[in-house]
């Protein structure tokens, strides 16, 4: 809302993307620590488990985004999916994929720290 009028939609999304990925990285670490305390421990989780967790989180994010686009912006579901084919939507799609990969990235980082 602040950057888009000044920079345009594509640059605004590109400026937002690193902040969203950093937040995703930090939150994925928090979720994995909570998971480690509650059930199986991070050492017992594989990177594949992180991909499953991230995939579920990605599905929930897209469902929430699509619901908001339909209810608040008045877009159709086809319009929502179609926006991923244009500049700002493509940048959002890449950021969403990064978000979905973050639990696996965090698990890999934590496992490499344990080995060292």
Image: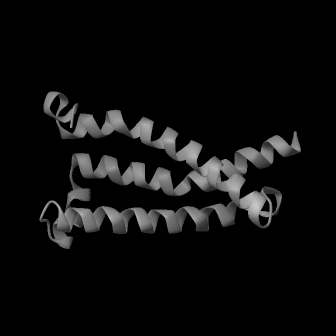
What is the residue that sits farthest to the right in this orientation?
116
Task: Report whether 33 appears left or right of 61.
Answer: right
Quarter of the picture containing the N terminus is top left
Residue at the image position 56 percent from the left and 47 percent from the top: 27
Query: Is 30 in front, or is 97?
Result: 30
Between 82 and 62, the one nearer to me in the picture: 62
62 left or right, relative to 105: left
Quadrant including the C terminus: top right
Residue 61 in the image, given as x and y percentages of width and height: 40, 62
Task: Farthest residue to the bottom: give it.
Answer: 77
- Is 108 situated above or below 12? below
| Residue 28 place in picture, x, y as percent | 59, 51
Tell me residue 82's x, y (percent). 20, 63
Q: Residue at x 55, y 61 (%)?
A: 54
Is 108 above or below relative to 40?
Answer: above
Residue visible at 57% across and 51% down in the picture: 102
Count of residue discs: 0
Q: Residue at x 21, y 62 (%)?
A: 69
Q: Quadrant of residue 46?
A: bottom right
Q: Looking at the picture, how far across and down is residue 60, in whole percent?
A: 43, 67
The residue lying furthest to the top in this view is: 6
Where is 109 relative to 55, above or below?
A: above
Q: In this view, does 55 lie above or below 86?
A: below
């Amino acid at each position: 809302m602040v950057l888009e009028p000044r920079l345009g939609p594509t640059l605004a999304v590109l400026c937002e993307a690193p902040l969203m990925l950093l937040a995703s990285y930090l939150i994925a670490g928090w979720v994995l620590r909570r998971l480690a305390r509650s059930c199986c421990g991070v050492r017992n989780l594989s990177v594949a488990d992180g991909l499953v967790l991230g995939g579920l989180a990605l599905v929930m994010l897209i469902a929430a985004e699509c619901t908001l686009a339909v209810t608040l912006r008045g877009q159709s579901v086809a319009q929502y999916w179609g926006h991923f084919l244009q500049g700002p939507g493509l940048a959002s799609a890449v950021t969403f994929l990064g978000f979905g990969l973050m639990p696996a990235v965090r698990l890999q980082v934590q496992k490499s720290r344990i080995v060292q």
